[in-house]
Image (cartoon, rainbow, N blue to C red):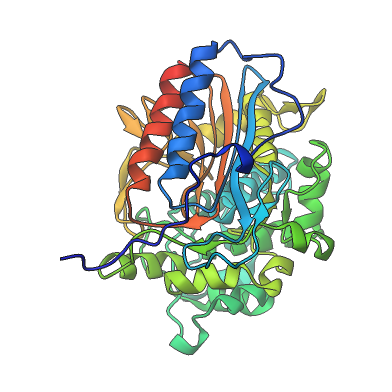
């Protein structure tokens, strides 16, 4: 007996009409030292991921040795969601379509804090309360910025009234800062993913120290030097019609996974998906979760880190700063929020050996996961930087197998 039917998109037999290759950058043939067989295998694995039915749209960008190998998209930015009928209008997803990075935004916020430390504005070993005195409340006085970056800050969640537990709270900056500062620690120094809370506190420290907004600091040090069109917290109103819509997909999320997901996401899983498509979410600044970017911009950001902080002839970060960003802070350990083994640096989710989130034998890789199967990462051993952006929000389903095969293919073909 079938207990539930996984939510899947309609998959066309011929993917050519819904595939877009950016400009003609791949017309010259294989690049980055990869053979035609290598690129063919990676592309076949990406198409298999789309055919899993979990994603209305996928955008993928891969650089190797700094050369653009892939910048492609499959599917739709709007329409063809799992619950959409045949009469719902469809809008093609292209490599230029902005997509919300969700938690992959944490990697960007972390880099900004490292940049501020490089400039002498903060010390990562210093207590958060040194820069933000209100944070010392309820036993959090000795928590350092480094602790927060590495998800050891002790405040992965907030114990607040259920009526307050709604996505719209993320759009009220002053209130959420007050709530986080007043909240007691819940996990000590144990590793526990700070899905929302850590980003706000890190950003508030940056704003208090610099007197600048988080967005302007991003513009100055990353976005403008990398010549990015998007890559912003929230997105300008003129671009709203271009933004990709997010869809709930995959197998129905039930207990106990639904409880784990709600603990990490602050609100029930379907509510996050719904809220992410609202105008208020698009105009908010959520440091841990709402940078809008393309796959190319995501890859470009990680390529800058892969190149030791250099981009377009400018030294955006010192090489030693980048080395610290990628350096493990502790060993593989059990994450008390995600309920899985994880390995973090001060701001990045790290790969692992024999296998990790970026594929097999990726101990040197660093990057970040975004809700649900969004990935931005760099792998120094393979000389690659990549952005994999998806619009289907699925926790369970066969897509996890095809995603694993895609990452394994990239890892083996770029070895």
The N terminus - image quarter: bottom left
In the image: residue 306, left or right of residue 265: right
Percent position (x, y) of residue 180? 54, 73
Percent position (x, y) of residue 210? 79, 55
Q: Residue at x 51, y 65 (%)?
A: 141
Percent position (x, y) of residue 114? 65, 42
Query: Is 397 situated above or below 43?
Result: below
Q: Residue furthest left?
A: 1
In this orientation, does residue 123 appear? no
Query: Is 68 situated above or below 299?
Result: above
Q: Residue at x 42, y 25 (%)?
A: 409
Name the quadrant containing residue 120: top right
Tell me how many marks there are.
0
Q: Nearer the viewer, residue 264 or 4?
A: 4
Q: Nearer the viewer, residue 399 or 51?
A: 51
Q: Nearer the viewer, residue 230 or 182?
A: 230
Percent position (x, y) of residue 228? 79, 41
Q: Residue at x 52, y 68 (%)?
A: 85
Name the quadrant containing residue 17: top right
In the image: residue 149, left or right of residue 263: right
In this orientation, does residue 82 appear? yes
In the image: residue 63, left or right of residue 211: left
The C terminus - image quarter: top left
Query: Is 101 situated above or below 204?
Result: above
């Amino acid at each position: 007996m079938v207990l539930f039917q996984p939510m899947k998109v309609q998959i066309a037999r011929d993917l050519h009409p819904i595939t877009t290759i950016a400009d003609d950058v791949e017309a010259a043939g294989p690049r980055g030292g990869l053979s035609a067989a290598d690129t063919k295998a990676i592309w076949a694995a990406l198409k298999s991921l789309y055919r899993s039915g979990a994603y209305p749209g996928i955008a993928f960008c891969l650089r190797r040795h700094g050369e653009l190998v892939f910048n492609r998209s499959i599917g739709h930015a709007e329409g063809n969601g799992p619950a959409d009928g045949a009469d719902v209008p469809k809008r093609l997803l292209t490599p230029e379509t902005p997509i919300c990075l969700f938690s992959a935004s944490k990697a960007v916020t972390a880099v900004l804090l490292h940049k501020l430390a490089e400039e002498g504005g903060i010390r990562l070993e210093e207590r958060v309360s040194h820069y933000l005195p209100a944070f010392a409340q309820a036993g959090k006085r000795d928590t350092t910025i480094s602790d927060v970056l590495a998800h050891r800050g002790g405040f992965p969640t907030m114990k607040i009234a259920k009526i307050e537990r709604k996505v719209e709270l993320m759009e009220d900056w002053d209130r959420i800062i007050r709530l986080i500062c007043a909240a007691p620690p819940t996990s000590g120094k144990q590793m526990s993913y700070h899905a929302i809370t850590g980003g706000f506190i890190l950003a508030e420290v940056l704003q208090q120290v610099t007197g600048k907004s988080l967005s302007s600091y991003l513009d100055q040090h990353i976005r403008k030097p990398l010549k990015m069109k998007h890559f912003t917290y929230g997105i300008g109103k003129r671009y709203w019609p271009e933004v990709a819509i997010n869809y709930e997909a995959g197998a129905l999320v039930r207990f106990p996974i639904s409880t784990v997901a709600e603990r990490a996401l602050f609100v029930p899983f379907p509510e996050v998906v719904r809220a992410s498509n609202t105008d208020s979410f698009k105009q908010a600044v959520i440091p841990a979760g709402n940078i809008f970017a393309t796959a190319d911009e995501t890859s470009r950001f990680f390529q800058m880190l892969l190149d030791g902080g250099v981009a377009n002839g400018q030294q955006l970060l010192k090489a030693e700063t980048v080395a610290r960003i990628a350096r493990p802070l502790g060993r593989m350990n059990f994450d008390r929020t995600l309920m899985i083994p994880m390995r973090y640096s001060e701001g990045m989710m790290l790969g692992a050996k024999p296998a990790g989130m970026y594929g097999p034998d990726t101990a040197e890789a660093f990057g970040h996961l975004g809700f649900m199967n969004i990935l931005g990462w760099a792998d120094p051993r393979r000389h690659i930087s990549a952005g994999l952006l998806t619009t289907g929000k699925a926790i369970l389903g066969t897509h996890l197998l095809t995603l694993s095969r895609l990452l394994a293919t990239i890892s083996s073909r770029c070895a």
